[in-house]
Image (cartoon, rainbow, N blue to C red):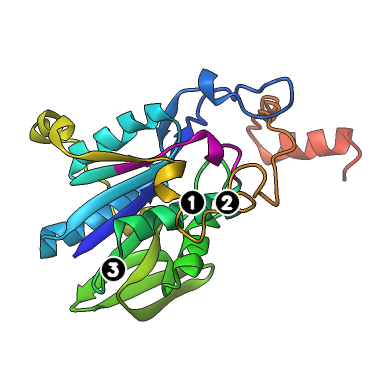
Amino acid sequence: MKAIVCVKQVPDTQGKVAVKPDGTMDRSKMATITNPDDLNALEAALKLKDETGCEVVVVTMGPPPAEGMLRELMARGADRGVLVSGREFGGSDTFATSQILAAAVNKIGVGPEDVVFCGRQAIDGDTAQVGPQIAEKLHLPQVTYAANIKKEGNTLTVKRMLEDGYMTLKVNTPCLITCIKELNEPRYMSIPGIYSCYAKPLEVYDYEALKDDPLIETDTIGLKGSPTNVYKSFSPPVKGAGMMVESVGQLVGILNDKHLI
């Protein structure tokens, strides 16, 4: 049994967004972190490993330096990593990215008891599209916004968060689950994990490794295969300082001065 976790290295949005002259983000000048929701997905997989002894595989699409992120996730407990990297994949939007990741998951192999985990959404795009698109392309049943997961045999019982409450669903494996931060508290890297993470296997899937998958065609990946593109990225303007009022009378006076009352 395997738990396959799709993760993404994203810019640290706590800092200033570096923008190229063409309006796109300059990721080379920004600090990167593991997408927060993906850490909850990893923790869900690691808890499944604690319960069942399954193998946990982390997979990401990105440039070669993303290997460092995968090593950190292996230090948290993942058993092996897969880095999907190639110039042919550059410029992919969510549609093309899901094509490529689905092909990578196909190559890893999805067995009858396996579960694919994704974070709800990435903080750089906030689309929440890639996980569901992967499920559709792999023809897997999916449950999104998982706030609790229990596995019994080949069935998962998932508590799914809605805007105004929760719903409980049962889904058979293999399946795909997207995870939210309310699901769990991600564990930290351990000292033994840090020592052992570079001894764990890490494979690199380039275009040649995936090109035989029917999902990988020149018009469905990369910039050419992306029906959407980012027109412009920018840091929102900083809001001005607020005004503190000490009494209702002061507030009424201010509103009166502005002819609002």
Secondary structure under badge 2? helix
Asked if the residue under mark 1 is in contact with the one under mark 3, i.e. CB atoms within 8 Å, the reply is no
Choose the circle earlier in sequence order: 2 or 3. Answer: 2
Q: Is residue 89 magenta?
A: yes
**What residue lies at 73% left-to-right and 33% top-to-bottom?**
232
Start and end of the magenta stretch? 82-92
Assign the C terminus to one quadrant of the image: top right
Neighbour class for label 1 at 10 Å: few (<14), some, many (≥20)? many
**Disc 2 crowd, CA 10 A, few/some/many (<14, 14-19, 20+):** many
Q: Are marks 1 and 2 in contact (CB under 8 Å)?
A: yes
Q: CA distance from mark 1 to mark 2?
A: 6 Å
Q: Find the distance from the CA under tag 3 to the CA under tag 1.
A: 27 Å
**Residue tagged by mark 1?**
100
Residue corresponding to mark 2: 96
Tag 2: amino acid: Ala
Q: Is residue 233 magenta?
A: no
Residue 255: image quadrant is: top right
Q: Amino acid at mark 3?
A: Ile
Label total for image: 3
Q: On the image, numbered disc 3 is attached to which residue?
A: 149
Location of residue 31 in the rendering, given as x and y in whole percent from the top left corner: 46, 23
